[in-house]
Image (spheres, rainbow, N blue to C red):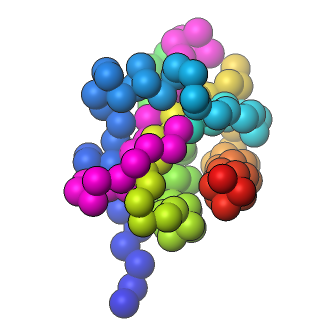
Amino acid sequence: MTKRFTFRKPEHLCLKTEIDALFTAGSRSMSVYPLRVTYRMLPYAGSGPQAKVLLSVSKRHFKHAVDRNRAKRQLREAYRLQKHQLVEALPNDKALHIAFIWLSDRPVPSHIVSARMEVALRRIRENIALS
């Protein structure tokens, strides 16, 4: 069976209550420049995706929408191509909510964003294995 490298709407973290819960106590975070990653483990009920993701690029960092959209596109693409490593490492009874927040004030080449995303996902997998 071939892997499907998709990032569909149900995998996006959209509900305000879920986003607020992600940024409260009990969440873990790390920085892998140009990203800040915040994540939270939750019980998994068996329906919907096991991992949900929020992508954020602040207007403070990029004043022009075209630059913010490019950074979000880079984040989406890097996550989409590497998420299978994270989902395979998740226990069947756990779900994961993740926020990727852009920190850099300058555009970053896509290959660097992809490499840093790989480092961030590997560190999340290691932390999941420890807990």
Residue at (49%, 64%) from the top-left corner? 91
Question: Residue sitting at 58 percent across and 9 percent down?
Answer: 60
Q: Nearer the viewer, residue 8 or 72?
A: 8
Residue at 44 percent across and 44 percent down: it is 42
What residue occupies the far bottom of the structure in this picture?
1
Question: Magenta segment, which residues?
Answer: 40-63
Residue 71 lies in quadrant: top right
> Is residue 49 rendered to the left or right of residue 99?
left
Q: Where 55 sits versus 79, above or below?
A: above
Q: Is residue 105 above or below residue 113?
A: above
Could you tell me residue 84's position as x and y percent?
Answer: 49, 67
Residue 117 highlighted magenta (yes or no): no
Report x, y in % for residue 15: 28, 28
Identify the image quadrant of the N terminus.
Answer: bottom left
- Residue drawn at x 62%, y 15% is 61
Residue 55 lies within the magenta run: yes
Above or below for 125 versus 112: below
- Inspect this view and state whether residue 107 appears: no
Q: Quadrant of residue 53?
A: top left
Residue 88 in view of the camera: yes
Q: Total marks drawn?
A: 0
**Nearer the observer, 115 or 95:** 95
- Above or below residue 45? Residue 55 is above
Instruction: Identify which residue, 99 or 109, lies in the foreground.
Output: 99
Q: Position of residue 18 (x, y in %)?
A: 36, 29
Q: What is the x, y in percent for residue 88?
A: 51, 70
Q: Quadrant of residue 102?
A: top right
